[in-house]
Amino acid sequence: MKKTLLLLFVFQFFLSIVSFSQPIPVLEPYLSGFTRPVKATHAYDSRLFIAEIGGKIKVVKNGIVNHNTPFLNISYKMSDLDWAGIFSIVFDPNYLTNGYFYVMYVVKNKFEINISRFSRVGGADSDLADASSETLILTIPYTDVLGGHRGGDMAFGKDNFLYISTGDNGPGSRGVMGDPELNSQNSNLLFGKIIRLDVSSTSPSENILQKIWAKGLRNPWRISFDRENGDFWYGDNGQDGWEEVNYLKATDVTTPKNFGWDYMEGNSVYRNCNCNITTSFIAPKFVYPGFTNNGGSSASVMGGYVYRGTKYGSLKGSYIFGDYQTFKIGMITPAGFSGFLTNVTYPSLVSFGEDNSGELYAISFFDGTIAKITGPTTPLPVKLESFTAKTIGCAIDLQWDTSLESNFSHFEVERSADGKNFGKIKSIPASGSDQVYRFTDENPLVNSNLYRLKMLDNDESYEFSRIIAANTECPANEISIYPNPATNHFSIKGLQTGNKVSVYNASGSLIFLEKIVSEAEIQINLKNYPNGIYTININEENAGDVIKLKLVKE
């Protein structure tokens, strides 16, 4: 009977591969020079933060990594800089105002793991943290298990609670009984669990056993929440037979759950529970053969993220995961495909990352590199024939014409002073047919203005035009903000070098602070903040004047 079920599963697995078409992600080289990186994440702005297992967290700005001055260096707090240091980092949902972030690491000369809170030095855009600011939140008291099954990761849910995954404290050796101390199903232990903490409280770990949100996990490596709908995903390494990806809808994440281990491994019974399997445990979303079921080849599933970026519409809504042993990358798509992709791998794949825009990254442990996960290169249904700029008095007239325009969404006119930092100044819908478009920039920057077009398809994929330039010697316009009201982003124009911009919410809390280093407008992201009235203060350098502006987010 068991053999029959196995053959049926394998048949269904391969049938799923041939029955559905699916997008094929492409991995583009992005960053290098890291030493055993394990995690990539963001702090609710354009920067990327890369954690190395040896105790350092490094900052990436505009595609450039600062290897010389880490954001945080706590290597002196750990013994094994190759295998047992930092496992995970995550930034507080209110990081822009409170400056808190959390680090999960193996304690020096011990086998236990600390989850600690640290603070940055300075304002929200600071590239330096204070190593002495550590506040211990929770300790997971692992014992000497040859370095195995600590399952460490952290993620904030849409409820702003911190979720922490733990391993079952088992040895994990091939051919031995898994979870020999029966930890995963023991509600009096923290092993093999997901713990849910309110880190905004004064004592987050008080009555910790009451904060176990899920049990029945073996060695969950990488957990995540879908940023759009709050669904929960994770990959759980199997004992010998099966690897699994687990999933919960956001509507199910408010009550304690049991994912089955060590009564279940994948969809197979591992230890008799004398219970109703169907009603007692959460069934995996996807299962694939492990060591004993695939001819003796090692396998270790690794959880990832649901793609919610805007650059590659064909990937949207797809969960991307991987396997640590084979380096393969797999997908679970809205169209029904579940499985690994042919010839899509990344060497020494150890983790995935997500930036503030929802774009995803793959991390190579031994190579020390980061790759961007991009979509298939499908041409846009529009061809840009020309794009010109002409100065007319104190304004700049932009003109472009298209051909082959069909089922296309819109254009965004972007402007920059330095050719690196562009901000949107106008959105223009597509006409649906070949046409000459025109837009007049009535409030250009003083002196140099660089423009480009962002051309967006209906599936949210896009391309940029070439950059064109135009100059005006008209005096600077007054400082102003647009659009107002705004939705997720707004821009400030008319700024001068040395201006200091600060943004406060309705309660008077500072949420953004930046000193202007060039005469350019800046764009500020309010996506993660509630609707309401915001105050923008602009301090002029070498003067006591403060310009106050009001912005409505709706």
Image: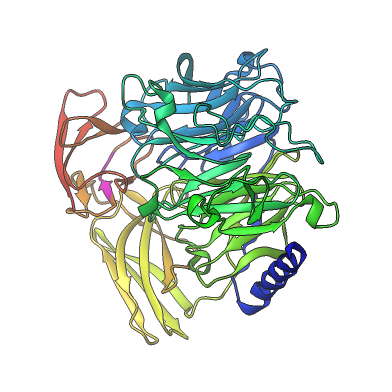
Q: Where in the figure is residue 504, as x and y percent of width and height? A: 21, 34
Q: Among all residues in the image, which is located at the extreme front?
A: 274
Residue 283 vertical placement versus 155 (above, below) = below
Give the mark count. 0
**Residue 70 seen from this side:** no
Q: Where in the figure is residue 363, as x and y percent of width and height? A: 65, 44
Residue 285 vertical placement versus 477 (above, below) = below
**Residue 93 seen from this side:** yes
Among the 4 quarters of the image, the one containing residue 198 = top left
The quadrant the N terminus occupies is bottom right
| Nearer the observer, 474 or 233 | 233
Q: Residue at x 54, y 47 (%)?
A: 259
Answer left or right for 111 relative to 116.
Answer: right
Answer left or right for 469 relative to 215.
Answer: left
Among the 4 quarters of the image, the one containing residue 516 = top left
Q: What range of the chain is rendered magenta?
A: 490-495
Q: Residue at x 61, y 43 (%)?
A: 261
Residue 282 vertical placement versus 453 (above, below) = above
Residue 372 vertical placement versus 124 (above, below) = below
Q: Where in the figure is residue 110, as x and y percent of width and height? A: 65, 15
The rendered magenta stretch, by its main secondary structure, is classed as strand
| Nearer the observer, 359 or 14 | 14
| Nearer the observer, 450 or 276 | 276
Q: Residue at x 53, y 28 (%)?
A: 190
Magenta segment includes 148: no
Q: Where in the figure is residue 88, as x and y percent of width and height? A: 56, 33
The image's colouring method is rainbow
